[in-house]
Image (cartoon, rainbow, N blue to C red):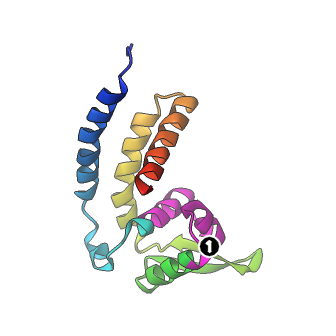
Amino acid sequence: MSTGLGVDDGVRMLLLLMPRMVGRAKRIPVPAELQSLSLAPRHLSLLSYLLFDGPLGVNELAKRLEVAPTTVSLMVAELSRADVVERAEDPADRRRAIVSITDRRRPAIDAWLSRGAHAWRKVLEPLTPQERQLFVDTLAAYERELQT
């Protein structure tokens, strides 16, 4: 059982750990067929939601990505031109566009992004729901703090 960690020791450990994590994530090769697209982190987040949650509406994607729907529409337009995603009319509401990953690009995107998801699942699964929430909240707070 862990006896705890002082704040300064925790900071020191994280200052060493975070660059290694980022470096490893950056070394995950982008599939050859997507390399010419110059995908930004926001594109990866959008593709991750579509990969793991299935087709979503533009407004739902905007909410999850914490950006304006027009920003999502622009990203979707970019990715549509490259045949990465496609828009379809929602049969229940023709005013609503549903966005999904194209069948052609799904295998490459799945192989690329699932490695990170598998690693997160493996380390989060043994935790209690409260511990997982604390971990996610802490990372989100760290990101917010970096922005100030």
Residue shown at the point (57%, 30%) measured from the top left: 130
Left/right placement of residue 28 relative to residue 96 reads left
Let me know if residue 57 is in the magenta part. yes
The picture quadrant where one finds residue 64 is bottom right
Q: Which residue lies under the disc numbered 1?
A: 58
Q: Is residue 61 above or below residue 145?
A: below
What crowding class fits label 1: few (fewer than 14 Cα within 10 Å), some (14-19), or many (20 or more)? many
- Front in this rendered view, residue 8 or 78: 8
Instruction: Report the predominant secondary structure element of the magenta stretch.
Output: helix
Query: Is 67 on the left or on the right of 16, as rendered?
Result: right
In the figure, 39 relative to 120: above or below? below
Q: Which residues are magenta?
A: 44-70
For this rendering, which residue is in front, 57 or 72? 72
- Please state the horizontal and vertical placement of residue 88, each as a whole percent of the image: 62, 79
Which residue is pictured at 41% across the width and 75% down the height? 104
Query: What SS does tag 1 mark?
Result: helix
Q: Amino acid at mark 1?
A: Val
The residue most toward the bottom is: 81
| The N terminus lies in quadrant | top left
Residue 137: image location, x then y, percent: 52, 41
Q: At x 55% / y 37%, what residue is drawn?
A: 133
Residue 4: give x, y in percent of width and height. 38, 18
Taking depth in this image into account, of 22 and 46 the one nearest to the observer is 22
Q: Quadrant of the C terminus?
A: bottom left
Q: Residue furthest front?
A: 148
Q: Where does the image place residue 12, in percent across and percent down from the top left? A: 27, 34
Q: Along the horizontal axis of the image, is 40 left or right of 96?
A: left
Closer to us: 71 or 25: 71
Q: Was residue 14 drawn as part of the magenta stretch in this picture?
A: no
